[in-house]
């Protein structure tokens, strides 16, 4: 087939034009529809990310709220176990003297510091060790001071009590008296309501006395190791009485004839005096 030069040029031009048109169409398709799809996908991803962030934020908020609720629940009424540290290894701890008359049995360690006088054993029996003004007793006295400070500093929701606690039933909590406390007209019951970790802290400004043959009774899984009597001056356990808990006393403790104790007699400055008593170290509760 024979073409003129001018015809050939026109034919080549037509082909070039057709090629450019197709390229332009392809470019429009790629940057138009395809770009719009990319934009849509990007927008969807952004929305999804935003929703995910919102969901995470909501989850974090819920977690924070749950954590706050847990903290509130753990705080309860502001009462916690008093950390006696090394003082907890003693059943009896005094500042000046420990004296005994009769067949007292103490099931645990006895300590004194800075005094040295521990008398009446025998006839009394100490089933643990006796620490007279040694390093262990001195450290325990420091720890007792810290424990008393901790018990005094507890706040939260205190329950004011005045006078005779006889005949009462008390659930766990913080109990305060601006003067003394007395168990006289009946027995005192401490009710844990099924929870062995229930704690009682009694903040007593002056004296504590439990009268002849009266009892402090633990019920519904209450534990003696979770009861704290923080006494501003002296404590007296009457003839034949039954007592429980940890006495953190400033001055002195007198345990009269035939009284029994499940707990500890710890006093900061003065004497602990016994007369034919049984003192049993309470089983420790893991908190």
Image (tube, rainbow, N blue to C red):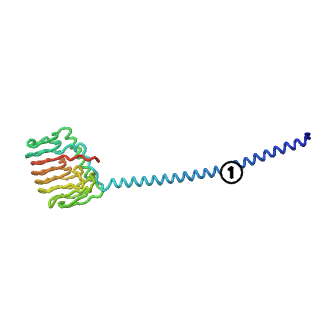
Residue shown at 88%/41% (left/top)? 8
Rate crowding at label 1 as few (under 14), some (14 to 19) or many (20 or more) other CA atoms within 10 Å: few
Q: Residue furthest top?
A: 135
Q: Residue shown at 19%/52% (left/top)?
A: 244
Q: Is residue 267 visible?
A: no
Dividing the picture into quarters, in which one does residue 167 lie?
Answer: bottom left
Does the image show residue 103?
A: yes
| Residue drawn at 15 percent across, 47 percent down | 279
Q: Is residue 29 left or right of residue 83?
A: right
Residue 101 appears at what percent x and percent y? 8, 46
Return the x and y of residue 194 as percentages of the image width and height. 27, 55
The N terminus - image quarter: top right
Residue 176 position (above or below residue 23): below
Q: Nearer the viewer, residue 204 or 33?
A: 33
Q: Quadrant of residue 176?
A: bottom left
Q: Position of residue 97 (x, y in %)?
A: 13, 44
| Residue lying at the far front of the rendered structure | 1
Q: Secondary structure at mark 1?
A: helix
Residue 243 placement (x, y as % from top left): 17, 52
Query: 119 or 189: nearer the eye?
Result: 189
| Residue indicated by mark 1 | 33
Number of on-image labels: 1
Would residue 46 appear left or right of 152 to someone viewing this image? right
Nearest to the observer: residue 194 or residue 259: 194
């Amino acid at each position: 087939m024979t073409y003129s030069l001018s015809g050939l040029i026109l034919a080549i031009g037509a082909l070039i034009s057709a090629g450019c048109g197709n390229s332009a169409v392809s470019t429009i398709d790629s940057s138009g529809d395809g770009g719009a799809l990319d934009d849509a996908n990007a927008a969807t991803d952004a929305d999804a990310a935003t929703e995910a962030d919102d969901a995470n934020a909501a989850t974090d908020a819920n977690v924070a709220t749950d954590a706050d609720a847990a903290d509130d629940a753990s705080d309860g009424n502001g009462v916690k176990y008093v950390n006696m540290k090394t003082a907890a290894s003693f059943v009896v701890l005094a500042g000046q003297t420990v004296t005994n008359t009769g067949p007292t049995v103490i099931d645990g360690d006895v300590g004194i510091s800075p005094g040295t006088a521990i008398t009446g054993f025998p006839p009394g029996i100490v089933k643990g060790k006796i620490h007279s003004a040694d390093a262990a007793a001195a450290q325990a006295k420091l720890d007792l001071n810290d424990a008393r400070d901790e018990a005094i500093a507890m706040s939260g929701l205190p329950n004011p009590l005045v006078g005779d606690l006889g005949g009462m039933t008390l659930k766990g909590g913080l109990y305060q008296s601006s003067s003394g406390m007395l168990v006289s007209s009946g027995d005192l019951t401490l009710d844990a309501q099924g929870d062995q970790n229930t704690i009682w802290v009694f903040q007593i400004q002056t004296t504590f006395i439990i009268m002849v043959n009266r009892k402090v009774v633990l019920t519904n899984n209450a534990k003696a190791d979770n009861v704290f009597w923080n006494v501003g001056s002296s404590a007296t356990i009457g003839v034949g009485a039954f007592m429980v808990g940890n006495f953190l006393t400033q001055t002195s403790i007198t345990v009269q004839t035939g009284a029994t104790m499940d707990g500890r007699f710890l006093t900061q400055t003065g004497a602990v005096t016994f007369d034919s008593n049984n003192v049993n170290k309470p089983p420790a509760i893991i908190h």
